[in-house]
Amino acid sequence: MTCLKPEGKTPGGKTAKGMDFNAYDEMAPRHAEKTPAELRNGGRVKSQAAVPTGVYRPNNNIQTPDMRSPEYVQMSTAAAITLGIMTGKMYRCDCTRCLNLLLTYPEGCRANCAYCGLARHREADRDYADRNFIRVDWPAVPVADIVEKVAADGENTPFHRMCISMITHPNSDADTVSVLKAWTDRIDPATVPVSILSNPTTMTRDDVATLHGLGADIFTVALDAATPTLFDRTRGKGVQSPHTWKKYWEILNDARDIFGKEKFGAHLIVGMGESEHDVISVIQELRDMGGHSHMFCFFPEKGSLMDHLPATPRDQWRRVQVARYLIDYCGARIEHMSFDEHGRVSDYGLPKAELDGIIDTGLPFRTSGCPGKFQEDISACDRPYGDSPPSNIASFPFQPNKTDLRKIRRQLGIPKTVN
Ligand code: SF4
């Protein structure tokens, strides 16, 4: 078993129009086929009503059982390998440091985000628990078994963090509370802190406060799209999805008030049609609020409404990675950077020697996300190969070595100064 998907989609150096970035006009989602009535809302799983019998491995040629949170959650392939629930190897990684959990229901996520493998339109071809998400399968496991295993490891757990990913479902607010309580009843949040990847569409400020009161450490909003127009096109009205930019920012502001500085953040996907200036402006805004941005490189997820589009060219992605690291951890500001007529970073406003030193640490190119126990700027949430194939890594789930850094510098177009 492996967490790696055999896929040939790697970013080109240039897009169809000869640009080295994914421009808005080229990144339109495709339209979804109509779902037959009997397959809507988890129809196949509910009509078959197969009883779950413990761990369910996706796409295993058996009827997908009727599994539901809070009794069941899904976990990333990397987490399942680390926990010993699945066998397998990850390219250049021994384990993941984040136990990423995902609420699960036969009805699945009721939103329809264009870039997401979990989107509602997929009920036409795949039961929810069998859908790929950030390029990997997510086996379903009883929550009680997960808690038991992690509690048994005590201080020796490999995990530096646990994360509950909510989805858009009428029960997800209450079930997130149940899963969090089941965890904190047995596991000290000081040993394994908990992040909440929220679903603002169904939440109120009181819900945010409840999760904080129950011991959640970091609260995150998956903004994903960097501008209101792009948000609407990819996860709002443009794809018959219920999310709005306004509601997402409302809950993000609630998170700032309730969780406080350094304890909230937002996911952003780079390369869906925004300019580099657009996304770096949001990164700066989040930092000014006291939070952090957790970045993903756009990858055309199989089965999604953007699966026909190009992955983000690596030079665009690397430029934004560097800018994000400088703003989040080095005190740099967008006002000190320069941009060209396409909004691409043309200068970071730093002496070359200083920039060289920061690039050489490799830290800007590691997966960004909620911190673990190593240091503030190293994410526990390393999401191995969640946004690229291992043949052309976007977010490094490990420390890049000298060979990796040479490739990164070529992608950035910033050769090292030789004295
Ligand atoms: S970055 Fe944080 S909130 Fe986002 S998936 Fe990882 S642990 Fe969860």
Image (tube, helix red, strand yellow):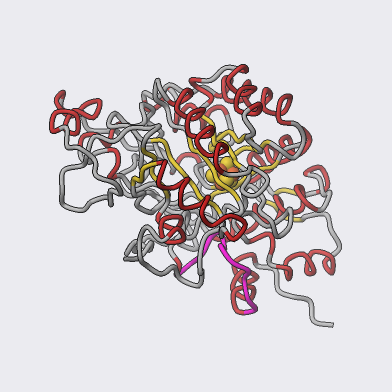
Residue 217 against residue 371 in the figure, above or below = above
Magenta span includes 397: yes
* Magenta stretch, residue numbers: 391-402
The outermost residue toward the bottom is: 419
Give the percent coordinates (x, y) of residue 69. 38, 32
What residue is drawn where x is 44% and y is 68%? 90
Residue 150 against residue 229 in the figure, above or below = below
**Residue 27 in view, yes or no:** yes
Quadrant position of residue 124: top left
Q: Nearer the viewer, residue 169 or 84?
A: 84
Give the percent coordinates (x, y) of residue 214. 62, 29
Quadrant location, the C terminus: bottom right
Dominant secondary structure of the residues highlighted in magenta in the image:
loop
**Residue 269 in view, yes or no:** no
What residue is drawn where x is 48% and y is 56%? 18
Decide if residue 266 is on the left or right side of residue 240: right
Give the percent coordinates (x, y) of residue 99. 51, 50
What residue is drawn where x is 50% and y is 40%? 24
Give the percent coordinates (x, y) of residue 149. 46, 52
Q: Nearer the viewer, residue 238 or 191?
A: 191
Image quadrant of ligand 1 equals top right
Residue 143 against residue 137 in the figure, above or below = above
Quadrant position of residue 249: top right
Q: Nearer the viewer, residue 245 or 319?
A: 245
What residue is drawn where x is 78% and y is 55%? 348
Q: Nearer the viewer, residue 169 or 363?
A: 169
Quadrant location, the N terminus: bottom left
Decide if residue 55 is on the left or right side of residue 270: left
